[in-house]
Image (tube, rainbow, N blue to C red):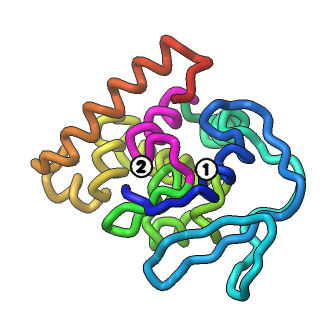
Amino acid sequence: MMTKSGPLIFIFLAALAGPCGLPGVVRGDIFRYVDGNGVMHFTNAPTVAGYTVYLKEGRVSTVKEMVRRYATLFDLEEALIKAVIKVESDYNPVAVSSRGALGFMQLMPTTAREMDVKNPMNPAENIYGGSRYLRLMLNQFNGNLDLALAAYNAGPGAVRRHGGIPPYAETRNYVDRVKKFLTYYRERKDIYL
């Protein structure tokens, strides 16, 4: 879940006003460029070729609004989505893991495509796709939160093969951490970090 970032990413995050849950308004399109080393660069005034539109001008939903919208859409607790985002990316919308998982909810490219997410680095699409996938995992495992979280982390096939949470330290730690933050966010409904 490591990303390389420069000052422009922090400007971009401030424009989104994401983790704080503050309303954000962007005056001008945001452009993105990925250089040969995989470093993402963001700007509102590209000076060289290769930048593509990443976010169009207009009002940007806050993380709080997006979480609320997709929690309602997929019948999930807001606290659960917040806990998964916290553990997956620590609220970093441009997080990229060493395995290639992307964005707030760390969607693998294959999972993103299966969830109809065209741009997994777009916060709204990422939270939509991650929430949808979380709902599918809960449905597959009859509402068993531990198994659904293990499937979100290690894949549903691994959970079925092992007849429960796989014996992977990473997955067991993941389930415990998400549940810890779930309790935290249930108690503190307005907290997002």
Q: Would you place residue 29 above or below residue 163 in this image?
A: below
Q: Position of residue 46 (x, y in %)?
A: 76, 75
Q: Nearer the viewer, mark 1 or mark 2?
A: 1
Label placed on residue 137: 2
Q: Would you place residue 44 above or below residue 86 in this image?
A: below
Q: Position of residue 187 (x, y in %)?
A: 49, 11
The residue sitting at the left extreme is: 167
Most foreground residue, 117 or 75 = 117
Residue topped by disc 1: 10
Q: Where is residue 89 in the image (x, y as percent from the top left)?
A: 44, 47
Left or right: 60, with 146 as reference point: right
**Residue type for callout 2:** Met
Left or right: 142, with 56 as reference point: left
Q: Which of marks 1 and 2 is nearer the N terminus?
A: 1
Q: Residue shown at 32%/65% (left/top)?
A: 98
Q: Would you place residue 190 above or below residue 63 in this image?
A: above
Residue stretch rendered in magenta on the structure: 78-93
Labelled pair 1, 2 in contact (Cβ < 8 Å) = no
